[in-house]
Image (tube, helix red, strand yellow):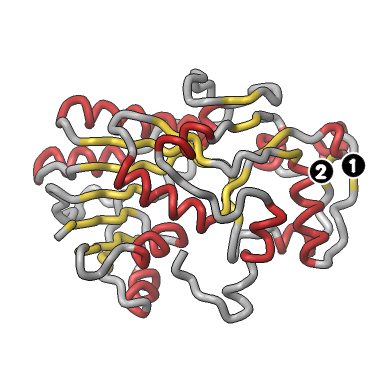
Amino acid sequence: MQRVTIVGCGDIGHRVALRLPVRESSVSCWVRSRASSRKLQGLGLASEVVDLDDSAISLPVVAGHSLFYFAPPPGSGVEDMRVAALIRAIAETGHPHRVVYLSTSGVYGDCDGEWVDEQRPPSPRADRAWRRLDAERRWREWSLSSGGELVILRVAGIYGPGKLPLKRLQSGAPMVAETDSPITNHIHSRDLVDVCLAAMARGCSGEVYNVSDGHPGTMTAYFNQVADFLGLARPPVISLAEARRRLSPGMLSYLAESRRLSNRKMVEELEVGLRYPTLADGLPASLDEEQGGNNQG
C-alpha cells in the first residue's frame, strides 16, 4: 500500500487526498489548526496538527512515503524555514521516497512578457518568490544528499471554486488599462490537482515543470472576464501613476511582472489533458460547488 503524506492540506491538498484510491493508499494530511483538522475529518480524511514553526514539536515519521509539500512559506523574509525544519526532521527519522513541491512561476521574476520555459534561469523580484526559490534549493540539496526523488512544480495563478476575486470586484477596486497591464497566467484548481497526481506518478526526478493552462493574457483582461461572468461591474481603469498611489504594495508587485508561461513540458512529459484550457472553459466550473457540486477535484 502506498503511504502518502500531504503537508499543508488546504484546498489543493484535500482535493489531492480525495482523489487517491482508498484501497491502495494510506493518506495522512498535515494542517496547522484543529479547526482545519476537524474539517478534514469531516471529509473522511486522516489528519494531524503539525506546526512547522514550532521548533519543539515532534514531527510524524514520513520515511518511505510519497510526500506532497503544499504548505506556504513564512509570511516574510527570503528563506523558507518551514521546509528547513522538515528536512532536518526527516534527516533523523527517515526520508520520503518522493517529494512533489508546489512552487510558483513567480521565481522567474519579470520577463517583459516573453514566453518562459523551464530553461529560463530564475530571477525573483518579490520576497515571496525568493522564499519559494529558497525552498526549491533546500529540496534539491535534500534530494542530492539523500537520494530521495524530487519533482518541482512552478505554478501559475490558481483560480477555481472559492478562488475567484469576488471581494475585490465587489469593492470596486481599480485596475490599470489593459495596454498597461502585465501578462499573467492561470491554472484551474482541478487541473492543478491532476498535475500534482501526475507529477507524483510520472514526473522525472530532478525536473521542474511549469503549470499553467497555456493561454496567458493581461491581468486586466482576467479581472474583466471574471466580472463579466459573475455579472459584476468591471474594475474602473486608472493610470499607472495613479495605481502607484492607490493600489497595495502586493498588487503593485504583481503589476511589475509580466511573462507568458509555456506548459509544453507539463503536457508532454506528465501526459496531462487539461479539463479547462481557457478561462472560458474554467469559469463556469468554478461555481459548481456553491451550486451543489462536489469538491473532489
**Pointer 2 residue:** 246
Q: Residue at left 48%, top 51%?
A: 192
Q: Residues within 10 Å of mark 2 (few under 14, many from 20)?
A: some
**Pointer 1 residue:** 238
Q: Mark 1 is on which residue type?
A: Ile
Residue 219 seen in this snapshot: yes
Label count reads 2
Q: Using the image as rendered, state which of residue 253 and residue 56 is in the foreground.
A: 253
Q: Residue at left 20%, top 64%?
A: 24
Give residue 133's mark: none
Between discs 1 and 2, the one toward the N terminus: 1
User: From the viewer's perspective, is the residue at label 1 or at label 2 nearer?
Assistant: 1
Q: In the picture provided, is 40 more to the left or to the right than 242?
A: left
Label 2 SS? helix
Q: Residue at left 66%, top 35%?
A: 253
Q: Are marks 1 and 2 in contact (CB under 8 Å)?
A: yes
Q: In the picture provided, is 196 more to the left or to the right than 228?
A: left
Label 1 SS? strand
Q: Using the image as rendered, state which of residue 277 and residue 292 is in the foreground.
A: 277
Q: In the picture provided, is 84 more to the left or to the right than 88?
A: right
Q: Is residue 17 above or below residue 271?
A: below
The residue most toward the left is 93
State the image quarter where residue 202 is shown: top left
Q: Residue at left 42%, top 63%?
A: 15
Q: Using the image as rendered, state which of residue 266 and residue 235 is in the foreground.
A: 266
Q: Is residue 93 above or below residue 141?
A: below
Q: Mark 2 is on which residue type?
A: Arg
